[in-house]
Image: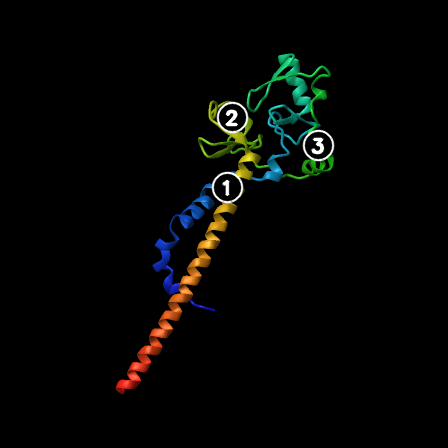
């Protein structure tokens, strides 16, 4: 195994932005601190902050519980405002129950989620789950935070932000692996050069009688 410790500082500049960006990705995509977990938050309704009950897709691709959508329809009539993006959604002739079922969320998965205490709670509103990511504040927030302190801020579904963050980390890890491999190859080359130099020094020393 080639020892590379003494060459690390010599190649800091060689690694350059690739290493710095990779380390930055780890700090900005701290999933454990932000409560990021795709499996958790993608199963929580943004309206009731509970595990989905008969989840329905809206045309804007946001998902909500059927009972929550029925309550919205009772208040707003034939045009629903999406609770997440505020897009206007016409109620189908058959009512909100005629909206597309989110078949990606199986009842088995939802039942499992209901039986587990999986969800990160909001540090401000302790009875609410964090389900959004505020890009302006770099913070995971709940629905009440979104409607109060973070009103008007650009937010995204927490699960979507987690997917993007995971992809960014994976890309930077790949670049970091490549940089490390190049560093090791350079370190091995330096060791070989030093070995050849030592051999030449020893040969010269033998010739002059040292």
Q: Return the x and y of residue 128 as percentages of the image width and height.
A: 57, 30
Q: Earlier in the sequence, mark 2 or mark 3?
A: 3
Q: Residue shown at 64%/34% (left/top)? A: 43
Using the image as rendered, state which of residue 4 and residue 106 is in the foreground: 4
Specify the label residue 103 is tagged with: 3
Q: Return the x and y of residue 97 as percentages of the image width and height.
A: 72, 21
Q: CA distance from mark 2 to mark 3?
A: 27 Å
Give the image quarter of residue 10. Answer: bottom left
**Residue position for label 1:** 33
Q: Earlier in the sequence, mark 1 or mark 3?
A: 1
Specify the label residue 146 is tagged with: 2
Q: Return the x and y of residue 85 as percentages of the image width and height.
A: 55, 23
Q: Look at the numbered disc 2 and give the secondary structure of its residue.
A: helix
Q: CA distance from mark 2 to mark 1?
A: 19 Å
Q: Can residue 31 be seen by looking at this rendering?
A: no
Q: Residue shown at 46%/52% (left/top)? A: 176
Q: Is residue 66 left or right of residue 6?
A: right
Specify the label residue 151 is tagged with: none
Position of 144 relative to 184 (above/below): above
Q: Is residue 29 left or right of residue 102?
A: left
If the image is split into quadrants, where does the C terminus sit?
A: bottom left
Q: Is residue 72 left or right of residue 28?
A: right
Q: What is the image's colouring?
A: rainbow
Q: Look at the numbered disc 3 and give the secondary structure of its residue.
A: loop
Q: Residue shown at 64%/26% (left/top)? A: 64
Q: Look at the numbered disc 1 and give the secondary structure of its residue.
A: helix
Position of 43 relative to 70 (above/below): below
Position of 6 relative to 153 (above/below): below
């Amino acid at each position: 195994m080639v020892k590379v410790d003494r060459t690390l500082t010599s190649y800091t500049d060689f690694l350059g932005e690739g290493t710095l960006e990779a380390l930055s990705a780890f700090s900005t995509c701290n999933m454990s601190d932000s409560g990021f977990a795709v499996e958790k938050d993608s199963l929580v309704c943004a309206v009731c902050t509970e595990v989905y009950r008969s989840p329905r897709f809206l045309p804007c691709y946001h998902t909500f519980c059927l009972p929550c959508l029925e309550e919205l329809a009772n208040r707003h009539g034939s045009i629903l405002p999406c609770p997440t993006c505020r897009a206007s959604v016409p109620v189908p002739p058959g009512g909100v129950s005629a909206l597309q079922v989110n078949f990606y969320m199986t009842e088995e998965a939802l039942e499992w989620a209901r039986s587990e205490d999986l969800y990160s709670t909001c540090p401000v509103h302790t009875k609410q789950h964090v389900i959004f990511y505020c890009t302006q504040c770099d913070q995971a927030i709940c629905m009440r935070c979104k409607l109060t302190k973070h009103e008007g801020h650009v937010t995204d579904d927490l699960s979507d932000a987690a997917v993007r963050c995971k992809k960014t980390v994976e890309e930077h890890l790949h670049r970091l692996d490549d940089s490390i491999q190049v560093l090791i190859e350079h370190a091995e080359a330096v060791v070989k050069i030093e070995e050849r130099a030592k051999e030449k020094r020893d040969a010269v020393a033998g010739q002059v009688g040292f």
